[in-house]
Image (spheres, helix red, strand yellow):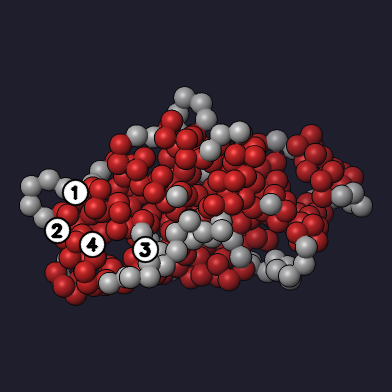
Amino acid sequence: MATVTPREDFDAEALAADLRKAMKGFGTDEDTIIEILTSVDNAQRQELRAAFKTMYGRDLVKDLKSELGGKLEDAVRAMLRPPAELDAWELRQAMKGAGTDEETIAEILASRTNEEIAAIREAYKEKFDGDDLEEDIMSETGGHLRRIFVSLVQGNRDESEEVDEDKAQADVRLCLACCHVFASPVCEAYRGISDYDLSKAVKKEMSGDLEFAFLAVLECARNPPKFFAKRLHRAIKGAGTDDDALIRIIVSRSEKDLADIAEAYIDEYEKSLVAAVKDDCSGDYEKLLVALLK
């Protein structure tokens, strides 16, 4: 279940005026900005951006960027990107620079629908000067992992309305197909066993990014809320916080299943996701994330 839904009394011009007022003059009214942006869904945010441009001849994203800072700015900018554009941006960032963030790539590709992957590929090409997402993934990854990513980015997974276990088995076959190319003995050993046993075998026989990618495919087919609950816990546990993952997951799942993820988090860790965010974040950044969770 979503935590963010369309606002029934939505008035793009009135809210655009309120946003302008919150940023105009001395000081910035962050509370108003947070209240407005978390009270509307992404489609309405795009209408807000258009109304703001029409009324004031200014770019809402640029104005907010000049008024905000730090992780609050990062979260607001993520919220104002259309979903496919946000995913395309995250994938680009995961492949940018010296290293590659294979976990982010696996998370996004394993959890999006075929339709969403097609939209991501189109947004990626549009935003990054015609670059092809599949080609970039192939240039940044290798081996078994590249085979899995290339299979996922085709957007041809079985999406029939069957029970989750059947979907999981279909994705198991996808993983096995990726490995079969290399005639891996461990992949041969998986054939004919249940997907639960396969998960245990993956953890035993694999490690690092390859293990994560396999488990992401399996867990997203079987129980997406549990998968994302684990991802969020990993982002906020320990000394540091993976704010990029925290923002990406909360923003991207807020209109899908964030309430279910919050329930799964309690079941898994005996602590509410809101409490975990409050313990790990602070200030207006915390307020925005908590508002998206409620």
N-terminal-most mark, 4 or 2? 2
Amino acid type for the residue under numbered disc 1: Asp
Of labels 3 and 2, earlier in sequence is 2
Q: Secondary structure at mark 4?
A: helix
Label 2 belongs to which residue? 21
> Badge 3: few (under 14), some or many (20 or more) residues near its Cα, within 10 Å?
some
- Foreground residue, 8 or 201? 8
Residue 24: % across, % down = 11, 55
Dot 2 falls on a residue whose secondary structure is: helix
Which residue bears the numbered disc 4? 60
Horizontal arrangement in the rendering, residue 216 relative to residue 248 (left or right): right
* Comparing labels 3 and 4, the label whose residue is closer to the camera: 3
- Which residue: 59% across, 41% down? 265
Residue 121 horizontal side relative to residue 110, left or right: left
Q: Which residue is mark 3?
A: 40
Q: Which residue: 75% across, 59% down?
A: 164
In depth, the one of 57 and 52 nearer the eye is: 52
Q: Is residue 205 above or below residue 92?
A: above
Dot placed on the residue nearer the N-terminal end, 3 or 4: 3
Report which quarter residue 16 is drawn in. Answer: bottom left
- Residue beneath disc 1: 29
Element carrying mark 1: loop
